[in-house]
Image (spheres, rainbow, N blue to C red):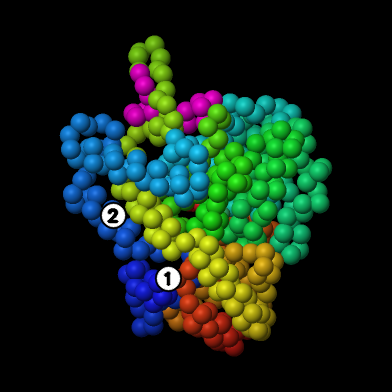
């Protein structure tokens, strides 16, 4: 196993200084940093193989296609998808949810049907369902939170009914850190004949995910939070569902035949990939998956767990600091908090002066903040390459924030 120093050396940006101090990058839930292997894979594609995919018979196009489709196969293995045909490339998790909402949702939902989501969703798994239920006349319902930041699963019997067509929920909250019992929730959805969509934007980068073990119908995630580039995302879907769903967007590559009086669609997965895809980004995501596989996702999860446990112990000692969400045993790498009456933007600005990058705001999860009666929070979020020393620096800087601005 590589040392943490060697792992950190794989990430050029981690050698940077901010305001004359070593960067402590604690904003990994927003986006992760990228290892050299990913940068090199994209650079290699642009320098040596740049051509469009699926279109040319020339050598460059064939090489680009092999790399692009090879990444699909590697990503399929990473999440244990039965076939790479079930891995559809999107720009990000948001686009993947929208694909399901506009393709499956518009085609299927009707008045009287219900879509169940939760109060801990990111806006990406709320707004598309608001738009689609409004257009179809279906009803959107929510599983509420309890004060510990867990889902009120005691209410699931009332909320999941034979009217529910889809239960869409986050595997790991980007604010509360809460890890939901995904396989159990999928089984509950199936128990009433509903489909289950899992938002894996915060779980796929941080812990082993096996779509066959989870038995989910859809899984969405973003490449940029798992060492890959922005502009790369994935929708995994159950094959018979994807086969039945109409295209999301029309254009080149997603068709088999186009005539003036109508068109026929390509087979999976290309039916859902209209236009020239993000070729370099997908190749970069393939390299990211190789990198993560090399480290081992079990190892990454354990490392992060140790970091989060330590961070929570230390943060709780900061005067006036209140952590949102459950204890370390039930959560992943995101730790959102408030610091007395200090505005989270002030906290983040003072930390930036110390070289520490955290996020402040509602983190695209306003309903969670409404539940706690606050407008915003500060959030430190960890990845395997973070260190215990960085957490010590965070805690020292927060003590300073409190002593300078504390009320
Ligand atoms: N959360 C954060 O700072 P996109 O933007 O499509 O790559 O990911 C959307 C998304 C969906 N679900 C969850 C649980 C997420 O955390 C995110 C992205 C980032 O928390 C950016 S707002």
Residue 178 placement (x, y as % from top left): 65, 61
Q: In this view of the protein, which residue sits in the foreground, 191 or 198?
A: 191
- Which residue, given by chain and number where applicable, does mark 1 sit on? 1
Question: Looking at the image, which residue is at 52% across and 54% down?
Answer: 204
**In front of the other: 242 or 290:** 290
- Asked whether residue 161 is in view, the answer is yes
Q: Which corner quadrant holds the C terminus?
A: bottom right
Q: Nearer the viewer, residue 91 or 227?
A: 227
Which segment is the magenta one? 242-257
| Residue 30 seen by the camera | no
| Mark 2 surroundings: few (<14), some (14-19) or many (≥20) residues within 10 A | many
Who's the residue at 53% across and 62% down the image? 298
Question: Which residue is rendered at x = 75% and y = 32% of the image?
Answer: 163
Query: Nearer the N terminus, badge 2 or badge 1?
Result: 1
Q: Name the residue beneath numbered marker 2.
A: 41
* x and y, in percent, of residue 300 in the image: 50, 65
Quadrant position of the N terminus in the picture: bottom left
């Amino acid at each position: 196993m590589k040392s943490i120093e060697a792992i950190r050396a794989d990430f050029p940006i981690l050698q940077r200084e901010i305001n004359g101090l070593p960067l402590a990058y604690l904003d990994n839930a927003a986006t992760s940093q990228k290892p050299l292997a990913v940068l090199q894979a994209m650079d290699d594609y642009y320098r040596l193989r740049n051509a469009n995919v699926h279109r040319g018979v020339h050598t460059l196009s064939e090489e680009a296609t092999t790399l692009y489709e090879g990444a699909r196969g590697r990503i399929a293995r990473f999440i244990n998808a039965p076939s790479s045909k079930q891995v559809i490339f999107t720009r990000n998790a948001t686009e993947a949810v929208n694909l399901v909402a506009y393709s499956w949702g518009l085609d299927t939902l009707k008045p009287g049907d219900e879509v169940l989501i939760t109060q801990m969703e990111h806006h990406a798994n709320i707004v598309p369902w608001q738009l689609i239920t409004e257009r179809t006349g279906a009803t959107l319902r929510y599983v509420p939170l309890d004060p510990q930041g867990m889902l009120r699963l005691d209410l699931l019997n009332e909320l999941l009914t034979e009217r529910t067509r889809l239960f869409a929920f986050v595997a790991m909250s980007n604010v509360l850190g809460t890890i939901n019992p995904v396989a159990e929730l999928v089984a509950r959805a199936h128990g009433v004949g509903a489909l289950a969509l899992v938002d894996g934007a915060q779980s796929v980068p941080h812990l082993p995910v096996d779509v066959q073990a989870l038995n989910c119908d859809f899984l969405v995630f973003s490449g940029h939070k798992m060492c890959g580039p922005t502009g790369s995302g994935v929708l995994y879907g159950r094959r018979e569902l994807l086969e039945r769903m109409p295209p999301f967007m029309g254009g080149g590559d997603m068709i088999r035949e186009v005539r003036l009086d109508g068109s026929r669609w390509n087979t999976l997965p290309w039916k859902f990939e209209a236009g020239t895809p993000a070729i370099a980004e997908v190749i970069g995501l393939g390299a990211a998956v190789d990198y993560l596989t090399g480290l081992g996702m079990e190892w990454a999860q354990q490392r992060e767990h140790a970091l989060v446990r330590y961070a929570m112990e230390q943060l709780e000692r900061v005067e006036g600091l209140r952590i949102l969400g459950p204890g370390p045993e039930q959560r992943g790498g995101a730790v959102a908090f408030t610091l007395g009456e200090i505005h989270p933007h002030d906290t983040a600005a003072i930390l930036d002066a110390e070289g520490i990058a955290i996020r402040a705001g509602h983190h695209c999860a306003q309903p969670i903040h409404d539940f706690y009666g606050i407008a915003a929070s500060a959030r430190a979020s960890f990845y395997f390459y973070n260190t215990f020393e960085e957490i010590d620096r965070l805690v020292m800087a927060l003590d300073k924030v409190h002593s300078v601005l504390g009320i």
